[in-house]
Image (cartoon, rainbow, N blue to C red):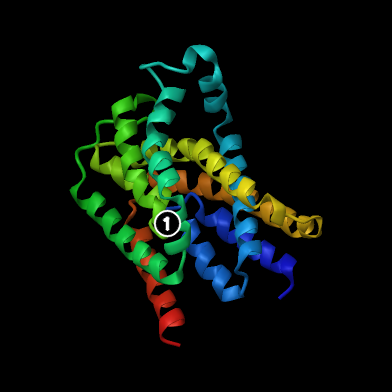
Amino acid sequence: MDQNIIAFILGIVEGATEFLPVSSTGHMILVGDFLGFTGERASVFEVFIQLGAILSVFIYYREKFMTMLRRENWIRNDGLSLAHIFFGMLPAMGIGYLGHSFIKNNLFSPGTVIIGLIIGGLFMLFAEKYHRPITTHNVERLTMYQCLLIGLFQVLSLWPGFSRSGSTIAGGLILGVSRKAAADFSFIMAVPIMLIACIYDLLKIIDQLYWSDFIMFFIGFVTAFVFAYLSIVWFLKFLNKSSLAGFAYYRFAVAAVALIYFFVF
């Protein structure tokens, strides 16, 4: 298959799934394997197009980011601040840094993704059924302690297939945070944590970037940006009237198809 078509397909997959509770990493591994696009070049491409998804979040929440970046809003208790984001990022950044090599070398495979999809789906169903009464309806009302606890749930997403948004939204529900507020926080927090992770990965593999790949990478980047933005707009509206259950069942279906494709045929 032409590499530019592969770039377009994977750009759609990355953009459409990055901020939905279905695991973009899991989908990229499964679809990339299905398309035969694997190896070091694929890894570089997947890291690069994530930057397109990151840009879409920054554009969507640009007013909140501009507000938080003002010095007087770095630390505050009466609204979302950089300190809230820092506390939310801390657990996953720390454990991700310490376990980076183990995760990359041992967890990025179809089998581990299938496990992550199933367990993550069960966790989301558990959160929907047994969560605390909702007391925090707006992201601006989150406390730093709540942000730290949501950050602890985000650690689960280090397992490919679990999903960053799935773990944080479900974790927020368990803590009494509304789906919308938890999603807003998850998406805003994703910008610095994904940016740091992408830069870290790119610096390690910068020598594998070639000008001959520019068109392919550009197509993937732009496609991921567009579909990520559309995905965010749709998902936030969806959360105002629906639960995570449908996404959990979707995850089970994807896991079943992947299990048959990779381990039966």
Mark 1 surroundings: few (<14), some (14-19) or many (≥20) residues within 10 A: few
Look at 24% across and 43% down and name the residue there: 174
Q: Is residue 31 left or right of residue 92?
A: right
Look at 29% across and 36% down and name the residue there: 149
* Residue 80 visible, this angle: no
* Residue 35 visible, this angle: yes
Percent x, y of residue 187 = 47, 40
Percent x, y of residue 81 = 44, 22
Question: In the rendered image, which quarter is residue 12 located in?
Answer: bottom right
Check the picture and name the quadrant holding the C terminus: bottom left
Percent x, y of residue 137 = 32, 32
Look at 38% across and 64% down and name the residue there: 251
Q: Nearer the viewer, residue 195 or 103?
A: 103
Q: Residue furthest bottom?
A: 265
Q: Is residue 113 left or right of residue 37?
A: left
Check the picture and name the quadrant holding the N terminus: bottom right
Percent x, y of residue 249 = 34, 65
Q: Is residue 255 left or right of residue 202?
A: left
Q: Residue furthest right?
A: 212
Note whether 265 is above or below 56 in the view shown.
below
User: In this figure, which residue is indicated by the disc labeled 1?
Assistant: 102
Question: In the rendered image, which quarter is residue 4 located in?
Answer: bottom right
Note whether 90 is above or below 174 in the view shown.
above
Tag 1: amino acid: Phe
Mark 1 secondary-structure assignment: helix
Look at 38% across and 75% down and name the residue there: 256
Q: Is residue 151 left or right of residue 56?
A: left
Note whether 183 is above or below 22 in the view shown.
above
